Image (cartoon, rainbow, N blue to C red):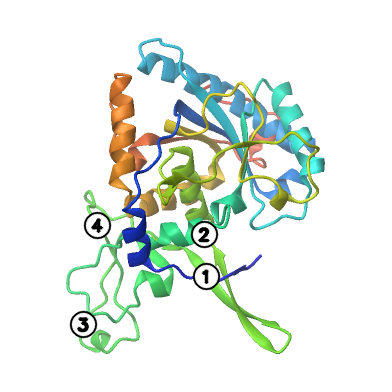
Amino acid sequence: MGRTVITLNTATYSEETGQYRPRQLQLSHLSIEVGHFYMEDLLKGKDRIRAQFKRVAPWVAAATTAAAVELGNVKPRVSTCFLVDDYFGNDTSPATIVDMVISIATECGITIDYLAREAGCYVVDSVLLAETVVARLLPEPPVGTNGSRPPLSESGWLCNGERSPDTDSEAMLVQPWRAPVQFGKRNHSIFLDIELWKDTTERDGNKPVSRRTWSCPLLASIWHLLRLGMLRYYGEPVAEPQQWDADWPQRWGDLPAVTQLNPRAAPFAAFRSTSILPHSYLEIEHAVDIILNHFDIDEAVVEQVIERGRRESLTIPREITSRISHVFIDDFDSPKDHGMSNADPG
């Protein structure tokens, strides 16, 4: 599904938001993502959803126990969240999906505190989150860059090192091929080049219309920033959870970006986060790590969180990626779907 291109002036964004004191958020100790389903997975029946939740449940307990140990056996504030991919596919209805997911999770011993929409990582309350985050990405220019490769703002590509030279450049006539090199590598490079968006041109009648589709790694990066309470717009938090007291709507877009399902839940945002995901998400989360390491985070927000942690005798890392952890479980269609035993988190 495409999205209309709307541009954001980076300098203007930075100057204007810098004038506002960021409002603080209530924070849990830990946010646990118990599910991140593609829409096609939700359409493949209850057994598929149940299979994942059965694998997730022991890891939720393990993550909660680990948080308590870290806090000195103080009962941790832990919230859980579930992300639905309504950005790349919204051909289902919350009215037919939400209660089913909640029911199966409860059956497996999991309480879902917050339901989030992936499209809410693109735009929420008219705030263009994807544009905003991209405007604050700071790529590292390789030594000797000559400007032949277009910048991130034009290419939509971000990498963690120095790419190989363009094969069609004149320099290749006199220089041998060079391998890409990872910045800060340890012995050997693990080079990653990430596509943040894809632009296409469609026709609306006789008029060509540009469409931009944001990539999974970029949207997932925004999802992590929201869970850690790191995003502000004119000093105000974005995508704050909202209660939903009516029947579930027919359209995903009619729901808030984040809906609070459990009225007694600990806060949505947290000092740290853990995501329990199928193994196929590993490459996306690797890309997320690179993106967040290039994100120019608001220092005022960072200082707020560090000070909040200090008041609870917690040491909160300044780096975003140091607050994020993952558990990767078997994919839906792995051999363990056919009778093999699951690994125990202990």
Q: Quadrant of residue 51?
A: top right
Q: Residue at x 28, y 26 (%)?
A: 315
Q: Earlier in the sequence, mark 3 or mark 4?
A: 3
Residue depicted at x 39% and y 69%: 9
- The quadrant the N terminus occupies is bottom right
Residue named by callout 4: 183
Q: Which residue carries the number 1 mark?
A: 6
Label 4 sits on a secondary structure element that is loop
Q: Is residue 298 left or right of residue 251?
A: left
Q: Amino acid at mark 4?
A: Phe
Vertical order, 73 against 292 (above or below): above
Left or right placement of residue 23 versus residue 215 in this view: left
Q: Is residue 340 visible?
A: no
Asked if 243 appears above or below 313 in the picture, the reply is below
Disc 2 target residue: 128
> Which class describes the residues within 10 Å of circle 2: few (<14), some (14-19), or many (20+)?
some
Question: How far apart are the two marked residues, 3 and 4, measured between alpha carbons?
Answer: 22 Å
CB within 8 Å, label 1 to label 2: yes
Mark before the other along the chain sequence, 4 or 1 = 1
**Left or right: 204 in relation to 300:** right
Q: Earlier in the sequence, mark 2 or mark 3?
A: 2
The amino acid pointed to by label 2 is Leu
Q: Earlier in the sequence, mark 2 or mark 4?
A: 2
Q: Nearer the viewer, mark 2 or mark 3?
A: 2
Residue in view at x 78 percent, y 33 percent: 99
Q: Nearer the viewer, mark 3 or mark 4?
A: 4
* Viewer-nearest of discs 1 and 3: 1
Q: Is residue 209 visible?
A: yes
Q: Pinpoint residue 271: horizontal percent, then vertical percent.
A: 40, 31
Q: Residue furthest top?
A: 73
Locate residue 317, reporting x and y percent.
Answer: 29, 34
Q: Are marks 2 and 3 in contact (CB under 8 Å)?
A: no
